[in-house]
Image: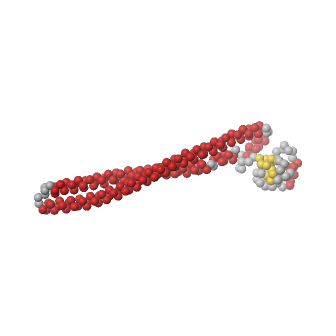
Amino acid sequence: MDQLAHRRSTLPEHAALAEVETRLRTLGDEIVGAETEASDLARELRKAEGDVDQVRERAERDQKRLDGGQVSSSKELESLQHEIATLGRRQGDLEEVVLEIMERLESAQSRRAELGAQQEAAHAQRLEVTASRDTTTGEIDGEVVQLVAQRSTQVGGLDDALVALYEKIRAQPGGVGAAELKARRCGGCRLELNNVEIGQLRDADPDEVMRCDECRRILVRTSESGL
């Protein structure tokens, strides 16, 4: 039962889920960053396009004045032509800015889409790992239920004082209350008993509770104990 409890608490799915959750948090932060960047760039793009429109409209007004013959003096004509040329260059520069912002916005939007796909995959992985964890823990819990029933049956045929001693020893580091004596070696501390200890065990009544002098666990004697 202790081994099953340990297995249940150390299932690889627990670590996998923790890793997925960390990944999802990271992706969530990155998505917020990508969305913020895209939003800022969209606002910047609208402003840049507005600047282009203003320059274009002003250039169109000047061109209409020029084409409509509304300019009489040569000096004013020269000034208007110069302004139209300047506005044309300014419009070209601003359109370059617009294109650059559009490229950055497209990149941010692509990044957002990519992160969204990764987030979707991580969510699917979380569902898969969770299902695997739940299946395994369910199987372990089923085994524990069976062992609890077996233990209750076995404990019912033992002396209460012996059970209390067993539980007291088992609560100590190591978690083992009774150990098989096999080939003169204690199954708890793995040490071989000396001849004096073996003699004491050999002479003891079969129902007498005997303990290892080294680890103090209850020794379970069998035909393979080497007595």
Residue drawn at point x = 32 percent, y = 56 percent: 98
Residue drawn at point x = 41 percent, y = 52 percent: 109
Q: Is residue 71 left or right of residue 145?
A: left
Residue drawn at point x = 55 percent, y = 51 percent: 19
Q: Residue 174: where, in percent of width, then height?
A: 71, 50
Q: Residue furthest front?
A: 67
Q: Residue furthest right?
A: 203
Q: Is residue 138 left or right of residue 106?
A: right
Residue 54 showing in the rendered view = yes
Q: Residue furthest left?
A: 72
Residue 200 showing in the rendered view = no
Q: Nearer the viewer, residue 39 or 201?
A: 39
Where's the N terminus, which quadrant?
Answer: top right
Q: Nearer the viewer, residue 35 or 177?
A: 35
Q: Is residue 72 left or right of residue 121?
A: left
Q: Is residue 109 left or right of residue 210?
A: left
Q: Residue 73: where, in percent of width, then height?
A: 11, 60
Residue drawn at point x = 83 percent, y = 47 percent: 222
Q: Residue 54: where, in percent of width, then height?
A: 25, 53
| Residue 152 position (above or below residue 176) | above
Q: Quadrant of residue 130?
A: top right
Q: Nearer the viewer, residue 3 or 55?
A: 55
Q: Residue 167: where, in percent of width, then height?
A: 74, 43
Q: Quadrant of residue 96?
A: bottom left
